Image: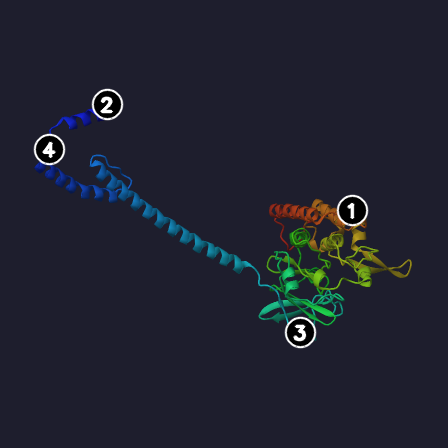
Amino acid sequence: MCKPRASSDALASQPAASPSSRRSSSSASAKRRPAATGASSSSPSTSYSGTGPSGAATGTGTGTATASAQRRGATSSSSTSSASSGRASLAAARASLPDPPVLYPFQELAAATNSFLAKRAGGAASASAAAYWRCSLRGRDAALFQLPRRPGAAAVDAAALARVGRYHHTSLARLLGACPAGAHLYLAYELPPGAATLAACLRGPRNPSFTALRSWVSRLQVAADVAQGLEYVHHHASAVHGRVSAFAVIVSDPGLRARLTHFGAAELAAPADAREVAHSPYAAPGSSGSEPSREADVYAFGVLLLELLSGEEPEKYRFDRGTKEFQRVSVVETAAAAAAEGGVRNWVDRRLGDSFPVSAAERLVEVALRCAALDLEDRPDMMWVAGKVSKVYLESRVWEQKLQVPTEFSVSVAPR
């Protein structure tokens, strides 16, 4: 602090400069200013101290203005690039979403199905919930189901379709649209290439001994897909399916991935009547309620899981030589008897060729029997069921990779 004061005193003690010396000093200062200004423009962040207050102010001010201009340009370019990136992301997100379902006119559906005279696939021609028409709607392969309309319900409009079609999941079939016509409702779903119903994959229509699901992991893949689809319907869509069966599951190739159809039928179509519920193998014995529920969905999935494991129909009639009568036998009863006697290994579908982990099969049978409990309160939540099935599926994938069993022949460690 002493040095600046001494410097000022020395300057004050000097004699006054002459006019000529002042002119030469001002001209020298003027010659130095452009250089200082040029230096400040090339180096905006540099501060100057020896050119006088005006020179320092000029250099610093020019550097600050240049830096501000550069910062404004960088900010503008970054905001422009951010906006363009946001628009591209939004466009990509919109492109990934499925098209909203549409209302098809009755004449278009009639033309696609030869006035509904074309042969149905997936089941008997009289079973409206099982059979469907394979057709092409506006350039897309579709499966068209005919369901009874809810009596006295309001007409199906675009708002109702939007409520159903806003949910999209990998385990749910994509709804293309609907057509209410008289007492029936037609629902169209996108049909993947080489797709067939789960019932047709388990038991060929022409050759019941043939199955497209020849490996243990392929069966568990279907079970995990259906379980995750139902879990999505119950807990993420806050809805009820109401028509779970092997005829409502579409299996596509490659990968043998399963998709659940009839999602939204509980809202758009009429519930099954008491007679249909009483004769349905996917409904609990003595079930008389026609309104769908989550507990009914869980029971139906339990039957479906046992059907996957055994390869048998959910129910069939066997002739009893003792009574000379046909007796109804359900897959739930045979699975419960096998679990009680420790014979799950002999109960599993023989077409799998003994190439499956027995402990995993026993755990899945236990899960399925809990789902098919007669008491509603004893049935588990679908989230718990999907977790158990997915865990066994992942363990089975690890088992398959370690074993590497060829599918052409079977491996048995003990006689059945």
Which amino acid type is marked by label 3? Phe
Which amino acid type is marked by label 4? Ala
Q: Is residue 137 above or below residue 209?
A: below
Q: Secondary structure at mark 1?
A: helix
* Picture disc at residue 106: 3
Q: Is residue 251 above or below residue 43?
A: below
**Labels 3 and 4 touching (C-beta < 8 A):** no
* Picture disc at residue 378: 1
Mark 1 vs 3, N-terminal side: 3
Residue sitting nearer the eye, 95 or 351: 95
Indicate the quadrant containing the N terminus: top left, top right, bottom left or bottom right.
Answer: top left
Which amino acid type is marked by label 2? Cys
Mark 4 vs 2, N-terminal side: 2
| CA separation in Å, label 1 and label 2 | 94 Å
| CA separation in Å, label 4 and label 2 | 26 Å
Please tell me whether mark 1 or mark 4 is closer to you in this view: 4
Q: Indicate the quadrant where residue 198 lies.
A: bottom right
Q: Secondary structure at mark 2?
A: helix
Mark 1 vs 2, N-terminal side: 2
Q: Position of residue 251 (x, y in %)?
A: 65, 60
Residue drawn at (11%, 29%) of the image: 15
Badge 1 density bin: few <14, some 14–19, many ≥20, Cα 10 Å: few
* Picture disc at residue 34: none
Please tell me whether mark 4 or mark 2 is closer to you in this view: 4
Q: Is residue 224 above or below residue 7?
A: below
Which amino acid type is marked by label 1? Asp
Q: Position of residue 221 (x, y in %)?
A: 65, 53
Q: Which residue is mark 4?
A: 17
Please tell me whether mark 3 or mark 4 is closer to you in this view: 4
| CA separation in Å, label 1 and label 3 | 44 Å
**Labels 1 and 3 touching (C-beta < 8 A):** no
